[in-house]
Amino acid sequence: MAPPIAPPFVSKSQTTDRASNNNGIIMENSRITRVTSVVVILFIVLICCKFGQAVLEPVVFAVFIIAIAWPLQKSMQARVGKAIALSVTVALTAAAILALFALIAWGGREVVEWARQNLDRIQETVMTSTSWLEEHDIFILTLIAEQFNTASVIRLLHIVAVRVNTILAFAVIVLVYVILGLAETEAVRKRIASLENRETSRRLLEGGRKIGEKFRTYIFVRTIASIATGLAVWGFVQFMELEMAGAWGVLTFALNYLPYIGSLIVTALLPLFAFVQFGSIETPLVVFFGVLVIQFIIGSYLEPVFSGSALSISPPIVLFSIVLWTFLWGALGAFLGVPLSIATLTILEQFPSNRWAAEILSGGRPGVSPRQPA
């Protein structure tokens, strides 16, 4: 019988290296699986948000309002009782929102009325511009000139009226959710605090507290920036001797709550109205660059001064969030896009396994640190 073959000698260092390599491969596979799972879950959530817009949109907007208004109610109810504090908080919140919508409605009505009174001048300007472009073999405005008439304006006004009715119904639903949510906020907080998993409970409560703080910072910064932008545009329109300076200032203030999109609307519309009023190309160009400079200075310098690193979100993520949620939920999605991203990143910060995503998406700002205590 042949003697048994001895197994090859394996040193202790080689065994350790193989074990380390195996552990590294397992960790890498685990990380890839976790990232894939997060992406799939986010994709499913976004699909649900798209098809469940009618149900989810008022709930999300109500939660955003509750997060901002809750400290006011909490500070009052210790002195005057929960019922009175809830009533005052809801009344003040509703008054602030109604005032904003009233300003938008007033500014929009002024612009529509001016367009109605100057319809002949607008059509003449469009036709003149079309003729000039056609002489240079550019036929872009031909279709617009054919379609722009009184009937098209009436159809537009009808669409606006339908939208207003939809907004009113939406506002009533949101108001009901806000009342119920403010009444139950303390109870929900206590239920989260009583969870068996104390660590998860602590992280959720801390995340909710930080989300509320960031929401209030966000709305404060947007309000300051909107006031400054509205006043600057009003003064600039007055200086350029354009009509409806007050309406443009109010609309700029209101539309500035829609990051990027509101600024784009004002920057595009004001030169068009200047072109209709003056009939020359020089004034609209001055208006365009003037408004662009105002938007750039306030957006690039004033807002960072007030927000600092408190919001902890990368500018490309801000733009992506606005585009994504505008696609999903329209104009309200453009407003809620940034708060939703802030809330998502804040929750990710609270859990060590997901903190890497918050660090990347925050743009490496000081507000997010992977070394926070677990």
Image (tube, rainbow, N blue to C red):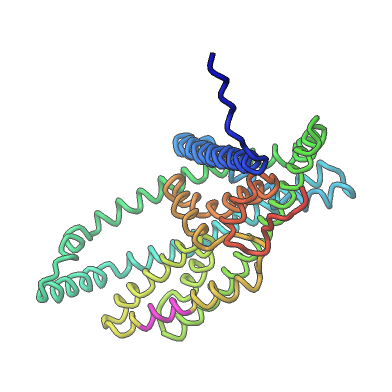
Locate residue 354: give its quadrant.
top right
Q: Where is residue 275 in the image (x, y as percent from the top left)?
A: 30, 77
Q: Is residue 319 visible?
A: yes
Q: For the image shown, how many numbered marks are present on the structure? A: 0
As for residue 290 lying within the magenta part, the answer is yes
Locate residue 16: give its quadrant.
top right
Question: Between residues 151 and 323, which one lies in front from this camera angle?
Answer: 323
Q: In this view, does 50 lie to the left or right of 153?
A: right
Q: Can residue 174 be seen in this view?
A: no
Rendered residue at 57%/68% (across/down) = 226
Q: Position of residue 177 (x, y in %)?
A: 64, 38
Question: Between residues 331 and 24, which one lies in front from this camera angle?
Answer: 24
Locate residue 8: give its quadrant.
top right
Q: Where is residue 286 in the image (x, y as percent from the top left)?
A: 37, 83
Overall secondary structure of the magenta stretch? helix
- 297 w.r.t. 66: above or below: below
Rendered residue at 26%/80% (across/down) = 279
Rendered residue at 75%/40% (across/down) = 185
Q: Is residue 83 left or right of residue 38?
A: right
Q: Which residue lies furthest to the front in this view?
A: 1
Q: Residue furthest right?
A: 79
Quarter of the image that includes the N terminus: top right
Rendered residue at 46%/45% (across/down) = 329
Question: Between residues 63 and 203, which one lies in front from this camera angle?
Answer: 203
Bounds of the magenta segment: 286-293
- 326 w.r.t. 49: above or below: below
- 359 w.r.t. 246: above or below: above
Q: In this view, does 324 lie to the left or right of 280?
A: right
Q: Where is residue 238 in the image (x, y as percent from the top left)?
A: 47, 82
